[in-house]
Image (cartoon, grey):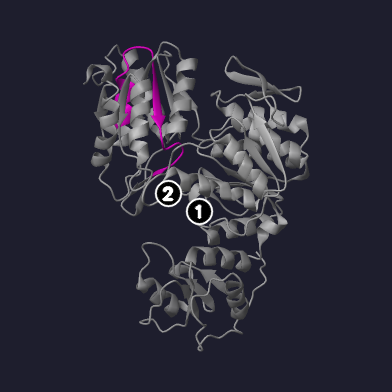
């Protein structure tokens, strides 16, 4: 990546113009010196670096290490006089970091077409639908579309599983710069409420911004204090967009549409219920394992299960129509689209057990998932395996517990990124709301063992819903990310064990969950 480097005085001028300087610049600064790197990771610092002090877990030792490695100044909301480096004091480090990141990486979004997607559910699916369409369109010329999602990141130089929906500004701008250097023209990215609230996307101009839906989620002391703050944070995406796309089927659609029209020069609507929408889905129906519908007189098909995915497909189709993508590419891209960890279905040899691995992790996605399961597997028992994360989205424990208890015949509560909380305590909180629905449940903190018990405990035609992790290969325990198998790997292994027991004429395994109070 070939970047133009700037002097420290140019970075200071940027902070001053943005009203972020909290004190006069120290006399010992070297304003004419070239900034070789902007970083908040002390282990990456090189001589000539400008170091940023940020994060709830920041320690002065990190700054001391940066100084030893050659940083010649630092930006912070707090001065650390014990470290002999000049301090550029700012009023808001997160906003400052975003602007400095854009400057260091030479504003790559200004030379790309970046498509931002926000919403309470469906962001990843819509992103993969868009990538599938754009990849097919660009392939004849040797091109492809970049992706920054909660599932994986691909920027033309790096590909890896993601641990955050939207990365911090320095990482985000690096990925955009990589995409530009790789010759990419398009990047599709998810924009979380936290990213929009805390300025991770500040400075990114979206060629298209999609607002899928809104529901109650991410309410906690560490995230959003209330729903109003959550919605307000998501609405920020419109002020960064050239064209905005709004789902008229969303809750608060009128409020969302008004915000889009106030803040964006062009707004396009889509819907599967309101024929007044600019992009409208007609004749929605199931055809075998596929979902078919019509848009602008053309037949479109999804070969992924879940009727709720029509809205995600409509969003992708609307964006691509605005970008000038041929309709045939939209149709073929949607038909072949797959989303890792979303509605992945595995079955026992006798067809008695279907295991569904899905990332559903909030009330909206849970309800949509269960409605689809009940519609597509009528009459079967539904056994659900899930947990809730520690330290955030505390409302999920009540809401997901109640939804799972209402729709399931039995529930297994387990670990799901407990962080610094006790996973047993998290499960106990969820259990109160499962029990209130008169649903049998069991707590098994070992996630693999929970999936095993759910599958081997099926003594009648059943669907085992394994929710919350999707394709994540880790558990966050404390401040560490611990590698673990995929939920799909667990499901396949225990379905094979189920098959072997059936062939041997043995009982399936653990006592059926429905018999446990």
Q: Which mark is residue 224?
A: 2
Question: Could you tell me how far apart the alpha carbons at marks 2 and 1 are, in whole angstroms?
Answer: 9 Å
Q: Are marks 2 and 1 in contact (CB under 8 Å)?
A: yes
Magenta stretch holds residue 463: yes
Q: Quadrant of the C terminus?
A: top left
Find residue 240 and report its horizontal and vertical position in percent. 64, 53
**Magenta residue span:** 450-474
Residue at 64% of width from left, 44% of height from top?
260
As drawn, which residue projects farthest toward the left? 517
Q: Residues within 10 Å of mark 2 (few under 14, many from 20)?
A: many
Magenta stretch holds residue 109: no
Q: Quadrant of residue 493?
A: top left
Residue at 72% of width from left, 57% of height from top?
111
Find residue 5 and report its horizontal and vertical position in percent. 64, 74
Residue 210 appearing in the image: yes
Is 29 rendered above or below residue 46? below
SS state under label 1: helix
SS state under label 2: loop
Q: Is residue 191 left or right of residue 382?
A: right
Q: Quadrant of residue 226?
A: top left
The answer to which of 149 and 371 lies nearer the viewer is 371
Find residue 502 and report its horizontal and vertical position in percent. 33, 14
As drawn, which residue projects farthest toward the bottom? 27
Q: How many marks?
A: 2
Q: Is residue 436 left or right of residue 222?
A: left
Residue at 49% of width from left, 21% of height from top?
372
Residue 386 appearing in the image: no
Residue at the spot of label 1: 197
The answer to which of 202 and 421 lies nearer the viewer is 202
Q: Residues within 10 Å of mark 1 (few under 14, many from 20)?
A: many
Q: Is residue 498 left or right of residue 87?
A: left
């Amino acid at each position: 990546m070939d970047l133009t480097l700037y002097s420290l005085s140019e970075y200071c001028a940027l902070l001053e113009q943005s009203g972020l300087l909290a004190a006069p610049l120290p006399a010992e600064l070297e304003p004419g010196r070239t900034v070789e790197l902007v970083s908040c990771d002390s282990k990456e610092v090189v001589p000539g670096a400008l170091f940023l002090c940020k994060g709830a877990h920041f320690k002065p030792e990190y700054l001391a290490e940066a100084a030893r490695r050659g940083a010649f100044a630092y930006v912070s909301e707090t001065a650390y006089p014990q470290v002999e480096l000049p301090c550029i004091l700012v009023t808001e480090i997160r906003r400052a970091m975003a602007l400095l990141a854009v400057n260091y990486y030479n504003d790559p979004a200004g030379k790309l077409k970046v498509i931002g997607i926000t919403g309470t559910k469906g962001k990843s699916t819509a992103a993969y639908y868009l990538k599938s369409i754009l990849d097919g369109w660009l392939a004849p010329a040797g091109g492809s579309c970049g992706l920054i999602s909660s599932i994986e990141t691909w920027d033309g130089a790096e590909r890896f599983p993601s641990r955050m929906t939207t990365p911090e500004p320095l990482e985000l701008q690096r990925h955009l710069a990589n995409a530009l250097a790789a010759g990419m023209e398009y990047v599709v990215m998810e924009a979380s409420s936290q990213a929009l609230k805390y300025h991770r996307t500040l400075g990114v101009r979206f060629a298209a911004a999609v607002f899928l839906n809104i529901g109650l989620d991410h309410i906690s002391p560490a995230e959003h204090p209330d729903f109003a703050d959550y919605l307000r944070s998501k609405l920020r995406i419109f002020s960064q967009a050239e064209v905005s796309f709004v789902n008229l089927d969303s809750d608060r659609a009128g409020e969302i549409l008004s915000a889009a029209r106030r803040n964006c020069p062009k707004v396009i609507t889509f819907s599967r219920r309101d024929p007044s929408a600019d992009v409208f889905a007609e004749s929605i129906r199931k055809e075998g394992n596929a979902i078919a519908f019509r848009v602008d007189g053309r037949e479109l098909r999804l070969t992924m299960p879940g009727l709720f995915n029509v809205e995600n497909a409509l969003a992708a189709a609307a964006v691509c129509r605005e970008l000038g993508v041929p309709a045939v590419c939209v149709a073929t891209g949607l038909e072949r689209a797959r989303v890792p960890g979303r509605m992945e279905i595995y079955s026992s040899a006798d067809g008695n057990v279907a295991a569904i691995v899905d990332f559903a992790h909030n009330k909206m996605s849970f309800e949509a998932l269960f409605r689809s399961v009940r519609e597509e597997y009528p009459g079967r028992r539904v056994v659900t395996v899930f947990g809730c994360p520690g330290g955030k989205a505390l409302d999920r424990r009540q809401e997901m517990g109640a939804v799972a208890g209402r729709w399931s015949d039995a529930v297994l509560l387990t670990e799901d990124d407990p962080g610094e909380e006790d996973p047993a305590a998290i499960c106990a909180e969820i259990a109160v709301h499962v029990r209130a629905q008169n649903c049998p449940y069991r707590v098994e903190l070992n996630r693999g063992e929970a999936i095993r018990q759910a599958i081997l405990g099926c003594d009648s035609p059943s669907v085992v819903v394994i929710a919350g992790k999707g394709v994540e290969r880790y558990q966050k325990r404390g401040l560490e990310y611990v590698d673990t198998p995929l939920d799909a790997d667990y499901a396949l292994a225990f379905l094979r064990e189920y098959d072997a027991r059936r062939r041997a004429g043995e009982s399936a395994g653990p006592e059926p969950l429905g018999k446990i109070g």
